[in-house]
Image (cartoon, grey):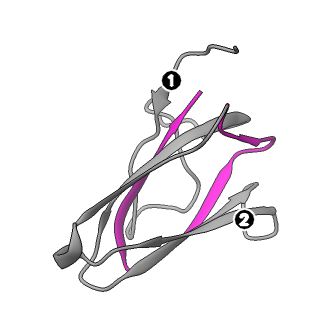
Amino acid sequence: MMQTDVLLTQPLGVTVGNTFKMQNGNVLGPCRIKAIYGTSAAAAGTVVLYDGTSTGGKPIGTISTPTAANGGTYYILMPGEGIRVDVGVFAVITNVDSAMLIYG
């Protein structure tokens, strides 16, 4: 079984850019997404992830988020070794207050 350090990205929010960054502010590069955590907005929303620095990157997936009244937070654990990204992670967020990646 492969083991690696597990770290958190800076929160990605409505007023922040769409490229996930490490805690030191550098753009997140190749990694394995282990989980996604975030806080919901008033309306149900989505987080669309891409392997790259824009929507021109390889689509990873779309996560539907609950309304703030129906939970307020979301946490999605990826199976196995997680999702491998080769470039970095770009996101388009809609009706989501924040999203954070747990990665290794």
- How far across and how far down the image is residue 38, in percent? 35, 56
The amino acid at mark 1 is: Val
Residue 1 visible in this rendered orientation of the protein: yes
- Residue 65, image quadrant: bottom left
Disc sitting over residue 54 in the figure: 2
Foreground residue among 1 and 72? 1
Disc sitting over residue 48 in the figure: none
Residue sitting at x 69%, y 14%: 1
Foreground residue among 102 and 81? 81
- Residue 99, image quadrant: bottom left
Secondary structure at numbered mark 2? loop
Task: Classify 10 Å Cα crowding around label 1: few (below 14), some (14-19), many (20 and above).
Answer: few
Residue, disc 1? 6
Question: Does residue 45 appear to the left or right of 52 in the view shown?
Answer: left
Q: What stretch is highlighted in magenta?
A: 81-104
Distance between mark 1 and mark 2 Cα atoms:
24 Å
Mark 1 or mark 2: whose residue is earlier in sequence: 1
Question: Does residue 56 appear to the left or right of 103 in the view shown?
Answer: right
Residue sitting at x 76%, y 54%: 52
Secondary structure at numbered mark 1? loop
Reply above or below: 93 against 50.
below
Foreground residue among 19 and 34? 34
Reply above or below: 42 against 9.
below
